[in-house]
Each structure stands twice: as structure tokens, then as C-alpha cells.
Image (cartoon, helix red, strand yellow):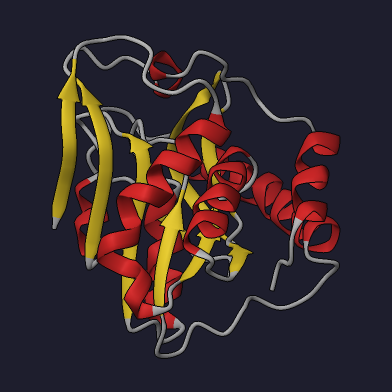
Amino acid sequence: MFKIMKRTKTGIVFRDRKDAGEKLGMYLEAEYKRFDPLVLGIPRGGMEVAYYVAKHMKAPLSMLISKKLPYPNNKEVGFGAIAEDLSVYIAANLRKTPDREIIGQVIDEQTDEINRRIKAYRKGGSFPDVTGRTVILVDDGIATGVTLVPALRLCKNKGALKIVVAVPVCGPNYDKHLNEADGFEVMVQPKDFYAVGQVYESFYDLSEDEFMSILERGSII
């Protein structure tokens, strides 16, 4: 079920990802803390939000690595995504999908990056056991949401009891396959949405070093 805390005019709502994570944790606590959830962040930016969600809810924290499949001439826009189990999702509602050869090249490139991140971020360790658990999938926001589709399907295939997608902000034209989640929690949805970063005072791509410092702050299972 898609739930929005409030709609807002275009403007700043969160100071940064820390502020967004703390507020999202407070928002989720009453509904989900009793289920002893496992919080899964999507590296890199989503992991910082997830860290503060898990900290506020006193919940275990881990990560789920999923990468957008970008158009070669526009890296900011994705035609699909690939999760760390190497399952691929290609969005069907796009006006233009790259040809098969280009899709294959992009998948190969992102597969290499997925494997690099597993080695670097999880020291080559396996995906956490989600069997029978309530999982809260956290990202720093949703524009199209394609990155989260294979992520939630991975959790479902691994036997999660309940899967909740939770983000500070979401645009109106998100991928409808996100409705496969058991819960879809959004704090704000701007009336004039154009980018996730529009509701953040400070929003930028985390560097590798900044991301690794987040992992060092707490216990990641």
C-alpha cells in the first residue's frame, strides 16, 4: 500500500540524508518496530539514510546492492536495474529501450560494479538471511524507482515475510512494480517534482571514502 505522510510544495524539507534518515525512522517506528525489522540500505546514498533509520529504530542494518542500468548517453537516467543476485529488470513503459547489444554491454559493466561493491563493501560476504523477516528497503528517494524493483524481488525470492519500501521523498511517476511491496512508505511527495535532491538542502553523490566511513560507524550484518 502506497502511503504518503504529506504532499508539499517544491522546497527544502530535509537538511541532509542524516536528517532525512532520522525523520524517516521516527515515521516508521510506530508501525514497524514491533516486527523486529531488518533495515536494508541501497548503496551509496540510501545507505546513509538507512543507517539513521536503523539507529533510531534500534534495528539491525545491512545493505542490498542494486545498480541502475543507465543509457550510454545519459548516465542519470536508467532503462532498468540489476540486483546483486544478478537478476535484471528492464522497465517496460519506456518510450525508447536500447537495442539488445547495448543492453548487454551495460549489464556487463554494471555486473562488474556489483561484484566490486560486494567485495569492497561486504568483504565478499553473502547477502543476509531474510527468511521469515520483515525487511525495510531504504533509499534516499525515488524518481523512477527502477533500482528498487529487482531489490524487492530479490528479498521476496529469498523468503522475506514482508517487504516495505521506505523513502523520504518520491516522485509521482514511479515504476508501478514497486507496488509489489507489502508496504510503500513515503514522507513527502512534492507537487512539482523534478528531482530527489530538490527537498534536500545538502544532496550530493557520496564518495567511496564517505560511504566506507558510514559502514564503519555501526554493526552491519
Q: Position of residue 133 (x, y in %)?
A: 41, 83
The total of numbered circles placed on residues is 0
In the displayed structure image, the side of residue 100 where residue 110 appears, left or right? right
Of the pair 172 and 200, the residue shown nearer to us: 200
Q: Which quadrant is the N terminus positioned in?
A: bottom left
Q: Position of residue 131 (x, y in %)?
A: 46, 89
Would you place residue 111 above or below residue 62 in this image? Answer: above
Rendered image quadrant of residue 109: top right
Rendered image quadrant of residue 199: top left
Q: Residue at x 48, y 48 (%)?
A: 81
Of the pair 11 and 110, the residue shown nearer to us: 11
Q: Position of residue 67 (x, y in %)?
A: 57, 47
Would you place residue 123 above or below residue 109 in this image? Answer: below
Q: Residue at x 32, y 29 (%)?
A: 96
Q: Which quadrant is the C terminus positioned in?
A: bottom right
> In the image as oriented, which residue stretches furthest toward the bottom?
132
Query: Looking at the image, can residue 140 be seen?
Result: no
Of the pair 210 and 193, the residue shown nearer to us: 210
In the displayed structure image, the side of residue 125 where residue 166 appears, left or right? left
Q: Residue at x 86, y 36 (%)?
A: 209
In the displayed structure image, the side of residue 41 where residue 126 appears, left or right? right
Query: Looking at the image, can residue 118 be seen?
Result: yes
Q: Residue at x 61, y 43 (%)?
A: 48
